[in-house]
Amino acid sequence: MIRSTTSLDDARDCVWDVIVVGAGPAGSVAALELARRGFKVLLADRSEFPRHKLCGACLNGDAIAGLRELNLAEAVKQLHGEPLHQFSLRAGGRPLSLTLPVGIAVSRSRLDAMLVESAINAGAEFLSGVRLELEPEQPGDDVRRLSTTDRNDSRPVVARVIVMATGLPNDRGTSDAGLTVVPARNSRIGAGTTTTTFPAEYVPGTIFMAVGRSGYVGLTRTNGDALNIAAALDHKAVRETNPRSVCEGILKEAGFAVSPEMFCGDWRGTVGLTRHRQTPAATRVLVVGDAAGYVEPFTGEGMAWAIRGAQAVVPFVERAVVDWNASIIQDWTRSLRQKVTRRQRRCRVLARVLKYPTMVRTLVRIVSAMPSLGEAVIRQLNTEHCDELLNPRTRHSGAA
């Protein structure tokens, strides 16, 4: 268990340079980098750590490159994840196997704990088990306030800048109208579990993906004997039965092996997966990671978006702490759309295609005959985007 390094009472007694709300990959990376640069940082999360997190648990090449740039390569190695080499997709019994250029499947609870510990070691304070909500802006004030659910003490927690990294975006936790969340029409919901009892077919080193009429299911071995199951499911199908039954049906329809025991774990769900925030910034507030907007990912892209977005937001936060200007809102919005949202478009197109199993089966036949086409898509999704996100021109022009 990772213990808080400060108390809520002590946190209330400070004026922080930055409060990062949400200790997932995006929040922890932002806190780590800001603490390394000498800012007084509070990293806060409503959950106790380590925690279970619904996620496909895959780090693709770009995510690994981002962690390497943060000097966390050795820490990632100590997580003992499973190297990924293969992507195996089935739709209507038709199989397709493609080579993955690089990747790691890792327990999210271990990864998130490692990133939180890295932020603490860099000098950030950590506060867990506390729900923070953004209070309305007070005109002319040079700070933003976060309220808590503590009925015994109504004093807020205060910072010059707030970084919101609260996961899949919703309108809870903020009073700013400009931060309104816009869900995509007919967006699928997320569901998943982890199991240690499953058919032998699910070997380490492969991302398995089953596509059916009611959604798709991804399965990946993580840390030895565990199998992570993560799915994007149609609302209607889930309402009629339950997530585990829908996942079982999709796997059978696609031609994958199933066993009753593999669905007996603790299932968790999400709101609609594809959604975006109207504006990913407000006065002294910058939004990063899934909280800014999310699209169904496939081979670890979501983790890369979170890590790269957190790296990209750091110079904007520096600028906001030192000399807040309303132009930062437009600058971060434009930068995020250019550097992260644009990269999500490929996955948005793929997510639409996956709603039509007949089309998927046709594509499987085509790519099976010409595997270089599929492997080109996989390579593009895994490409390192460090030059695009972190080149000197971007760093200085975006933060100047």
Image (cartoon, rainbow, N blue to C red):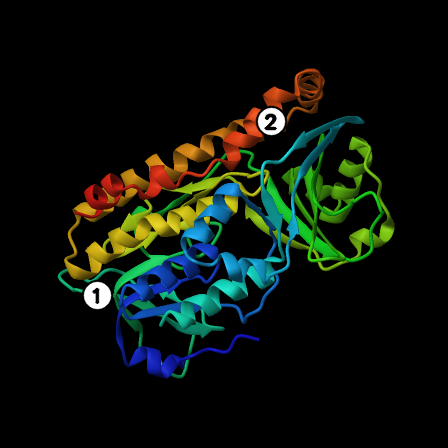
Mark 1 belongs to which amino acid?
Answer: Val
Mark 1 crowd level (few <14, some 14–19, many ≥20, 10 Å Cα): many
Q: Secondary structure at mark 1?
A: loop
Q: Is residue 122 left or right of residue 57?
A: left
Identify the residue position indicated by label 1 in the image. 143
In front of the other: label 2 or label 1? 2
Q: Is residue 214 left or right of residue 140?
A: right
Residue 52, can we see it? yes
Residue drawn at 17 percent across, 60 percent down: 322
Task: Please state the horizontal and vertical placement of residue 226, each as a whole percent of the image.
Answer: 74, 56
Residue drawn at 37 percent across, 63 percent down: 31
- State the residue in front, 208 or 260: 208
Q: Secondary structure at mark 2?
A: helix
| 147 is higher (above) or lower (below) than 282 | below
Q: Is residue 249 left or right of residue 355?
A: right
Task: Please state the horizontal and vertical placement of residue 241, each as a whole percent of the image.
Answer: 75, 45
Residue drawn at 55 percent across, 27 percent down: 377
Identify the residue position indicated by label 2 in the image. 375
- State the residue in front, 199 or 262: 199
- State the residue in front, 380 or 257: 380
Task: Please state the horizontal and vertical placement of residue 88, each as a whole percent of the image.
Answer: 71, 34
Mark 2 belongs to which amino acid?
Answer: Glu
Task: Please state the horizontal and vertical placement of residue 392, each as a whole percent of the image.
Answer: 25, 43
Residue drawn at 40 percent across, 59 percent down: 173
Q: CA distance from mark 2 to mark 1?
A: 49 Å
